[in-house]
Image: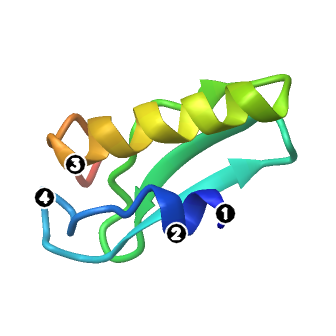
C-alpha cells in the first residue's frame, strides 16, 4: 500500500475541493488542494521510513485544517 492509500485526506478546509499528497523529486511530501491550491508545509525526508513519517504528518496537518492559501494579489 502506498502513502496515497495509507494516509487519506479530507476535503480542503478552504473550498471543499479534493486534496492530494504530492512529492517533489523524492525529497519532500506535502498536501495540496486540486481546486484552490491551498497546501501544507512540505516535510523533507531522506529514507523510506522518513517518507512514511512525513506523509503521516502532512495528512494530519491537512485533516485538521493547518493549510496555507494565498489570496488574490499576494
Q: What residue sits 81% from the left and 35% below the top?
A: 48
Q: Which of marks 2 and 4 is in front?
A: 2
**In the image, residue 52 above or below residue 16:** above
Q: What residue sits 57% from the left and 31% below the top?
A: 54
On screen, residue 63 versus residue 24, left or right, reads: left
Q: Nearer the viewer, mark 1 or mark 4?
A: 1
| Disc number for residue 63 | 3
* Label 3 or label 4, whichever comes before in sequence order: 4
Q: Which of marks 3 and 4 is in front?
A: 3
Quadrant assignment for the N terminus: bottom right
- Determine which residue is flagged by label 2: 5
Say if mark 1 contacts mark 2, CB within 8 Å. Answer: yes
- Determine which residue is flagged by label 4: 14
Q: What residue sits 22% from the left and 48% below the top?
A: 63
Q: Position of residue 38 (x, y in %)?
A: 33, 53
* Label 2 or label 4, whichever comes before in sequence order: 2
Amino acid at each position: 500500500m502506498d502513502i496515497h492509500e495509507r494516509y487519506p485526506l479530507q476535503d480542503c478546509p478552504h473550498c471543499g475541493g479534493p486534496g492530494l499528497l504530492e512529492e517533489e523529486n523524492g525529497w519532500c511530501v506535502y498536501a495540496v488542494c486540486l481546486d484552490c491550491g491551498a497546501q501544507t508545509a512540505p516535510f523533507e525526508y531522506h529514507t523510506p521510513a522518513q517518507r512514511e513519517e512525513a506523509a503521516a504528518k502532512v495528512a494530519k496537518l491537512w485533516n485538521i485544517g493547518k493549510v496555507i492559501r494565498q489570496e488574490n494579489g499576494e
